[in-house]
Image: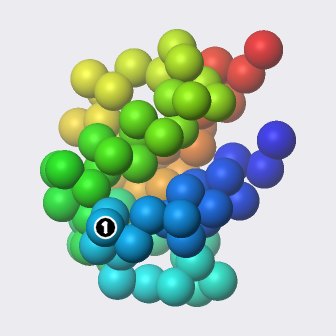
Amino acid sequence: MDHLALIKKIIDENEDLGCRLKSSEITENHLIQKDLGLDSIGLMSLIYDIQDVYPDLDETLMTNWQSLKDLIEEMKKHES
């Protein structure tokens, strides 16, 4: 599965996340808070939507995720 595409799809479908960038501009190197502008509530919403696909993704680890690459690496750990 294309993890970045999933993240972009979720961002496209949820304007209330408050993402500063268009999904077409987003790369895995973008920082979640600094570049995308997601606050803790926006990040939790994103994580909950990702958990629909990756139910074992541990949202308590989100404080460790600085970039989308960090989040994607965690998603890869939970592929079946």
Is residue 76 placed above or below 80 in the rendered structure?
Answer: below
Quarter of the image with the C terminus is top right
Name the image colouring: rainbow
- Can residue 64 be seen by looking at this rendering? no
Residue at 33% across, 27% down: 59
| Residue 76 screen position, x and y as percent | 67, 30
Residue 3 position in % (x across, y down): 69, 48
- Please tell me which residue lies in front, 66 or 12: 12
Q: Amino acid at mark 1?
A: Asp
Place of residue 8 in the rendered image (x, y in percent of width and height, measured from the top left): 60, 65
Which residue is located at x 39 percent, y 20 percent?
58
Horizontal side of residue 16 vs 27, given as left or right: left
Q: Is residue 9 left or right of residue 57?
A: right
x then y, percent, for residue 48: 41, 35
For mark 1, what is the residue?
16
* Secondary structure of the residue carrying numbered label 1: helix
Q: Residue furthest left?
A: 40
Along the line of sight, the residue nearer the viewer: 6 or 70: 6
